[in-house]
Amino acid sequence: MPGGWDTRPPFLGLEGRKPEEVFGALPTPCYVLDEQMLCRNGEILAGVAERTGCKILLAQKAFSNYDLYPTLAPYLAGTEASGLYEARLGGEEMSEGEVHVFCGAYRQEEFQELLKYADHIVFNSPRQLRKFGFMAKEAGKSLGLRINPECSTQEGHAIYDPCAPGSRLGTTREVWNREMTAELVELLDGLHFHTLCEQDADALELTLQAVEEKFGDVLPRMKWLNMGGGHHITRPDYDIARLDKCILYAKEKWEVQVYLEPGEAVALNAGYLVTKVLDIVRNGQVQIAILDSSATCHMPDVIEMPYMPPLYGAKAEGKGCYVYRLAGPTCLAGDVIGDYGFDHELREGDMLLFGDMAIYTTCKNNTFNGMPLPDIWKRDRNGELHKLTDFGYTDFKMRMGSK
Ligand SMILES: *Cc1c(COP(=O)(O)O)cnc(C)c1O
């Protein structure tokens, strides 16, 4: 379909070529991580850091494909982890950077090991700070407490709102007042908040006001303020000037080192899921293309968030348009990616290309239904393809029983 290919992000650099022309040699399904887009994102983030003096970390829960850490490292100050394993991965694979960790609750058995990898440790509650903080301080760590500014700035995605009523994430001012003794406050080097999800800088601005109202009195005692992730900094219409302003405000007002720890923004639009049509079935008026990749196994956020991922060459539904429901091969009735329009009929064997597949995919996928895990490939800066890893039956079986 000449002219039908959109080559803006997330399909930058494909120059209008058909998926087969670029990825025809790859086994499907497979993920392709795009080094050029990672560098583009990295440059935007490094620009923020340079202008404001803030430090930017990769939140590994969104993207932990460590083969690309050397590509990202020059743009970042280090990694952020959700617990021991990610902290270890960051420590091992981006060893020149800082390693920060936040976990809803740490376990006694793993805390000693965590001290080997993490240099900044953020606690969720005063109780956890009391339980582990003295040991961590003795080991020379920089300690923080996650606060809950109780300022919801997002609608629609309640499961992604750490400020929703009854949230377990972060310490409210009420709890701070009741439980933070002078001795505990003394332990702290910084405060941490993470309240955003795919949001612009206006939401950060509002949140920062709430942080100031609730915790403005304690901030001058702190060395750093971590503003978490959820900043969609590398999205083309993101208001970077306003982000810079927020960072500089905090830095000047409280004399703190500001940290940001985006996940999505680091690898936004920097990957594809390459898939093929296995069969076309029909139910009444609905034409359904069954693919060799699955929403629930290979792009679980399509169902969990939920959202419809961009598809290369797809057009808005309308006249002269062939509409197909794209769906996975599993037994789950809801394993559906969405209804997409094409300007031609789909056929068995056609290759399709989902965009923005570097984030929350390879680190969230699963082998439900015994589905194979897609291989992971890299497309380097010259457009050349390299296999990073592949998977087989053993990767399915080893999680189910004795080795
Ligand atoms: C999820 C998370 C991030 C990254 O969020 P993105 O939306 O991917 O930018 C950063 N920090 C913490 C504490 C998180 O839970």
Image (cartoon, rainbow, N blue to C red):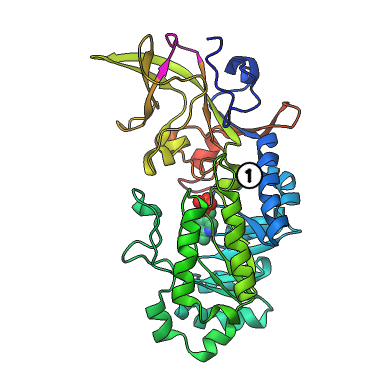
Q: In the figure, residue 118 lies in which quadrant?
A: bottom right
Seen from the viewer's position, the closer of residues 152 and 146 is: 152
**What residue is pinned by disc 1?**
65
The amino acid pointed to by label 1 is Asn
Q: Does the magenta stretch include residue 206?
A: no
Q: Is 342 included in the stretch rendered in magenta?
A: yes
Q: Which residue is drawn at 49% across and 44% down?
A: 364
Dividing the picture into quadrants, the one containing residue 8 is: top right
Q: Is residue 382 visible?
A: yes
Nearer-the-camera pick, 174 or 134: 174
Q: Residue furthest bottom?
A: 182
Q: What span is in magenta?
A: 341-350
Is 194 above or below relative to 379? Answer: below
User: Residue 83 appears at what percent x and percent y?
Assistant: 55, 62
Per the image, label 1 sits on a secondary structure element best described as loop
| Residue at image point 45% right, 61% down | 206
The location of residue 363, given as percent across then percent down, is 54, 45
Side of 169 where 52 appears, left or right: right
- On screen, residue 328 versus residue 117, left or right, reads left
Where's residue 382, x and y in %? Answer: 76, 28
In the rendered view, would you say 178 is above or below 320?
below
| Res. 113 in view | no
Residue 289: x and y in percent read 39, 18
| Residue at 54 percent of width and 90 percent of height | 183
